Image (cartoon, rainbow, N blue to C red):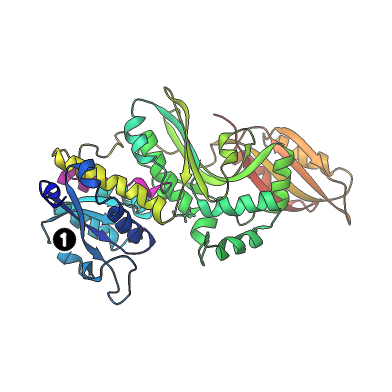
Amino acid sequence: MEENMSRYKEIKAAILGAGTVGGGVYKLIGRRQDELPDKIQAKLTVSRVLVKNLNKKREGIPSELLTDDWESIRKDPDIRIVIELMGGIEPARTYILQALEAGKNVVTANKDLLAEHGKELMDAAERSGCDLYFEAAVGGGIPIIRPLKECLAGNEITEVMGIVNGTTNYILTKMTKEGMDFGEALGQAQKLGFAEADPTADVEGLDAGRKMAILASLAFHSRVTFQDVEVKGITKITARDIQYADAFGYVLKLLGVARSEDGQIEAGVSPVMIPKTHPLANVNDSFNAVFVHGDAVDDAMFQGRGAGEFPTASAVVGDVIAVARNMQYDCCGRIGCSCYKNLPMKPAGESRHKYFLRLIVEDRTGILAGVAGVLGNNGVSINQVIQKPAVDGVAELVVITDKVETRHLHDALVIFGEMSMIREVASVIRVYTQK
Ligand code: HSE
């Protein structure tokens, strides 16, 4: 065995960050140690693990590998792959740029960084002729980045959408299947470790928004940043909205939807009612899925675990193996930035969607006519209406619109806000329609 191994050259890597994902990557590389030489024709070793606190014990990682000195990694010419798993913008951004400048290949799972500074990092990789791989940045263990860049490269992709946040999918699944309200479902998700103590980035749709910026950039070959993505979370969703969705034949999901149409891109994350027959409607609990439409492939869906120690490590180690293989053939930097177009974002308000509106109104003559009049005067066509019998002088009026330019709906909502007969616009939720 020893003799056999010695014919392979050694590729050294450093992991930055020894949290859940960093630890998982270290362990998975260890688990595959015997097979890796056959897979990549080289021996792969993690020779350094960068941590902030050297005194903290890292289960499964030998303490002699730990360092808190980035410079010792940056300046070590034997370290050829840097695996960035610290998360956050800084110092991750600086370390990645310095690693690329030093001729090291980089694998990262850092969606926040890519969604805001993707161009800067891709440019740096191109300048240095190094690989920058980031499969784990979207959808954890689900292969979607390289499929978009490579396997689907023959397509014109016009839509990419998905359930890209496991925390919110878990919460919405609980609300749907067990009738819980948002607070109760969030509490349970936190107790079981599916939601963080501060769940803001997940429940407000920010995490999903960053992932959609990355997916849209890859799908449409034009840079979309997090600021370009319209984001709305699930904190205002009630069990009642979910019951109505069910009655109308829909399931409510936090959906990222990005489309390219007439030379413009629109990208958003929001609660969306999707038909029960759509494949995404059956993606439940903490699972993620990404649905892609291309002119040649038609519809394709990628589903799996969007987070967690080993699912995420699966994507990261896959990238490390790809980089190591490229190194063997001296072809790193082969697949660089694929944003060769410069498409504008569709102006806010011009996108056309169908909507579900739930209004709490006074129970008196002329209300339905008043609501219909405001919608009609603003060019919002009604598709379906339900009015529930009034309780204590207050009734609930539910309207599903036809497809409407969002700005026209906004105009109608402003007028609703000024009408005393409308006590509350309780919900405004997008309903999925095909392009
Ligand atoms: N917090 C994310 C989720 C996982 O709930 O899906 C990391 O991106």
Choose between 285 and 262: the one closer to the eye.
Answer: 285
Residue 216: name its quadrant. Answer: top left
The x and y percentages for residue 285 are: 57, 50
Against 63, residue 266 (above or below) is above
Q: In the orientation shown, which residue stands out farthest toward the top?
A: 296
- Identify the residue at horizontal 51%, vertical 51% (top origin): 166
Q: Residues in magenta?
A: 122-139
In the rendered image, residue 166 lying in the magenta stretch gets the answer no
- Quarter the C terminus occupies: top right
The x and y percentages for residue 83 are: 26, 55
In the rendered image, residue 136 lying in the magenta stretch gets the answer yes
Residue with the mark numbered 1: 74
Choose between 226 and 197: the one closer to the eye.
Answer: 197
Residue 309: name its quadrant. Answer: bottom left
Q: Label 1 is placed on what type of residue? A: Arg
Whether residue 342 is visible to the viewer of this picture, yes or no, is: no
Whether residue 215 is visible to the viewer of this picture, yes or no, is: yes
